[in-house]
Image (cartoon, coloured by chain):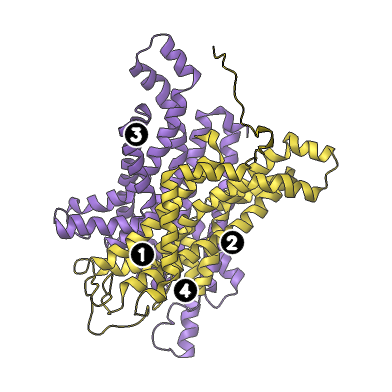
Amino acid sequence: MNTEPVSLPPSSSKIVVKSRGLWGNAWRRLRRNYASLFSLILLAIIVLLCLLAPYLSPYEFDDVDYDNFSSPPSFENSHYFGTERNGRDLFVRTLYGGRVSLSVGLVATLVSLIIGVLWGAIAGFVGGRLDNLMMRFVDILYAMPFMFFIIMLTVAFGRDILLIYVAIGAITWLDMARIVRGQAISLRRKEFVEAAVAGGVSTFNIIRRHIIPNLLGPVAIYCTLTIPSVILVESFVSFLGLGVQEPNTSWGLLISEGVQTMDSSWWALVFPSLFLMATLFCFNFIGDGLRDALDPKDR
Amino acid sequence: MFYFTLKRLFWAVPTLLLIITIAFFLMRIAPGGPFSKERPVAPEILANINKVYHLDESLPEQYLRYLGNILQGDLGPSYKYKDFTVNELIGLGFPVSAKIGGIAILLALLIGVSLGILAALRQNTPTDYTVMTVAMFGITIPTFVTAPFMTLVFGVLLTWLPIGWDDDNWTSLIMPIIALSLPQIAIIARLMRGSMIEVLRSNYVRTARAKGLSERLAILRHSLKPAMVPVLSYIGPAVAGIITGSIIIEQTFNIPGIGRHFVQGALNRDYPMVMGVTILYGALIVFFNLVVDIIYGFLDPKVRYD
């Protein structure tokens, strides 16, 4: 038994305890998750490299170096990743491909976010027959062979990058809609929402103060997990030669070109693959970390 | 139970109809016809060609004709291989695709479930961490990266396995099947681990152990079956995943299956071929989902009253 008098710090009455909100707590937990933190840093480096691509190499992404066809990586001639069979610099092309892949990831995820959140929120909050109808529609779409439809879309409308963005976004919203609907249904019945209604808070303020902050967590988690799957779809389509067109490039297209020359020049396959895999890993780890951080009871 | 099955069957109809409709209209929007790639032909001949392919009819008429033909199992003529119908081409390619896909899915179930159980029984041990790390790799690394790398390592550098496809040599099956099943192995292992851990913590397993059953019996008799349920319901998506993956695999390994036909059809604007493969694969996915749904309904009575 400790009988010593507890000595309080002299100015204890002045200590203001700053409360941490949901996001502050989540950030603290995320920082302690080394896999996620490392992924965050690595991803930042990849994004930065892609953004700064024009300043990092003396070559343009479509410059042909007539002295170096399929030359191995070398620092002497500034072809850090070597050149491909047409003499174009692979370092710059990999980073430019990253720009396409990453922007597809962002734009398509944004499209899926908008459709999915609206669809799920309406179904969840209105409920009843409309909810049933809307979710049946989602169920039916779920059974569609999507990769086939995307490929058909590129056949029908030409190989336009913008189209690929929208098409991929338009098919990845299904999971988002289900998640948001589930959240909406459980939120609608929560006591604090009831209390707010009883207290006379306006609908707009209920949505702003109670609904949106509570939806944000699952949506943020799902977004970080949608981005890599979208990048994967784009790479898949480009790999088959049905996506991004020359001289533009993406990681999928670079990998498929690398495959064709892999027995003579391994670098053309290895570097784009490494970038793609690193990016996918980063997003997946960040997503997992975010889930643990925002929903600790799930661990 | 009969009502439940009937309801599920009923929902497969609009799904199939939607697949056919989307496929049909997307391919009608697409530019070019059966002969537009070759040298221009005289208008009279073009009119004749259009008549043969029924392209002179109005769009609704064409759509209804296509639907009617599909009901009779006829997917129309191929625009690219003019001596063949789509049915004949699919008939040639499907056995190959089905063999590879079928083996891949069985392999994925077998290895995935075993690894999942292993990881769950040794939760938070190095075994568990190893399995889960490998699974993370399997999920993240796409098939179009693993397949070339496998070819590079085992085919080109080590020359253990043949590169590409050889009908008479079964060793040429090994790489495609492994590349195809890897992501599914990873997903199934994660699923199985999760559900197994949950079941092992459940009250009835605790009771089984408390009444003095051996660990072996507690696992084999009481845990395994309920833990398999989520894996079972994943078979539908797994089939879809294998089918999608097979497009890449058949393209990379030069396998004459229908996934390859599909890609070649898309590149050559062979619209009936593209439609035919999409509809066939769509129907397969719907079918597997249906079967799994119904089995699921038998296993888990709660589902039926949704």
Q: Position of residue B101 (x, y in %)?
A: 34, 49
Q: Which residue is mark 1?
A: B261
Q: Which chain is yellow?
A: A
Q: Residue furthest top?
A: B211
Tell me the kind of residue under disc 1: His
Which chain is mark 1 on? B
Check contact, mark 3 vs mark 2: CB within 8 A.
no
Q: Which label lies toward us, 3 or 1?
A: 3
Q: Which residue is under mark 2?
A: A111
Q: Chain of mark 3?
A: B
* Image-based side of A69 in relation to A12, left or right: left
Q: Considering the numbered disc 3 on the image, is that residue within a helix, a strand or a loop?
A: helix
- Colour in which chain B is drawn: purple
For the point 33% across and 47% down, which residue is it? Answer: B181
* Residue B36 x %, y %: 44, 82
Q: CA distance from mark 4 to mark 2?
A: 19 Å
3 vs 2, front mark: 3
Query: Do discs 4 and 2 belong to a common subunit?
Result: yes
Q: Amino acid at mark 3?
A: Asp
Instruction: List the single residue furthest toward the front.
Output: A10
Q: Is residue B258 visible?
A: no
Q: CA distance from mark 3 to mark 2?
A: 37 Å
Circle 3 Cα neighbour tier, 10 Å, few/some/many (<14 / 14–19 / ≥20): many
Q: CA distance from mark 4 to mark 1?
A: 20 Å
Residue most toward the bottom?
B42
Give a yes or no on whether discs 3 and 2 share a subunit: no
- Residue A159's tag is 4
Q: Residue at x 86, y 42 (%)?
A: A200
Q: Could you give the CA–CA distance between mark 2 and mark 1, rounded to whole angstroms?
A: 31 Å
Of all chains, the one bearing label 4 is: A
* Disc sitting over residue B128 in the figure: 3
